[in-house]
Image (tube, helix red, strand yellow):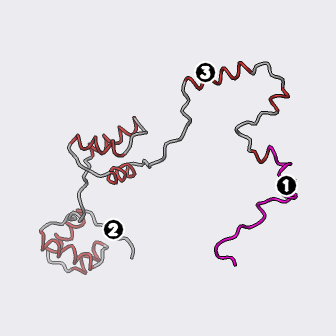
Amino acid sequence: MAKTRELCKVIRDRIVDLHMAGMGNRTIGNHLGEKATTVDAIIRKWKKFKVTVNLPRSGAPCKISPHGASMIMRKVRDQPRTTWQDLVNDLKRAGTTVSKKTISNTLRCHGLKSCSARKIPLLKPAHDQAHLNFANDHLDDPEEEWEKVMWSDESKNRAFWSKLRRVFGGRSRMSTTPRTPFQP
């Protein structure tokens, strides 16, 4: 079913005025370019509630006020590593009790999404000093010594590839399919 558009207040008032003047629903619809059923629904609503504006929809009201939402956005913008629990505690201190899911929905509505913090190595000054000492100790080593060093970005398989090829008969182990529980 297609979405329907709502008529503005001016057209609704005009429909009621024409009805009060004695025109029929079909005539009003033809005159204003609306369907007779739409005109009939507006007139029934006016007779029942004495208003022509749209009534509020059902649904729970927002627990977080616009002021609270702006406070949340400000805190997240200033401190991106803030957790949901911190935001819940801040709102609780302000007098609003909400869940973490409500905070998550509010942030998502304002264009923010959650992400995991990047895992970076935590280097202490002692680590930096150890690196500096290692570099100073091996400053005068010849280039042949450095070729024997296994660097952290090398895999052991690549470094010892020729030895592995001899052990496995020159074929890759990846070509054999592993047995699954469904194979006989």
Image location of residue 93, percent across then percent down? 23, 40
Which residue position is annotated with label 3? Answer: 129
The secondary structure type at the circle numbered 3 is helix
Within 10 Å of disc 2 (Cα), the crowding (few <14, some 14-19, many 20+) is: few
- Compared to residue 95, the image places residue 176 above or below, namely below
Residue interval drawn in magenta:
159-184
Identify the image quadrant of residue 60: bottom left
- Compared to residue 29, the image places residue 95 above or below, namely above
Which residue position is annotated with label 1? Answer: 167
Q: Amino acid at mark 2?
A: Arg
- Compared to residue 19, the image places residue 112 above or below, namely above
Image location of residue 66, percent across then percent down? 27, 46
Determine the residue positioned at 22% across, 76% down.
Answer: 41
The secondary structure type at the circle numbered 2 is loop
Q: Earlier in the sequence, mark 2 or mark 3?
A: 2
Which residue position is annotated with label 2? Answer: 5
Determine the residue positioned at 24% across, 75% down.
Answer: 39
Left or right of residue 156: residue 27: left
Which of the two marks, 3 or 1, is nearer to us in this view? 1
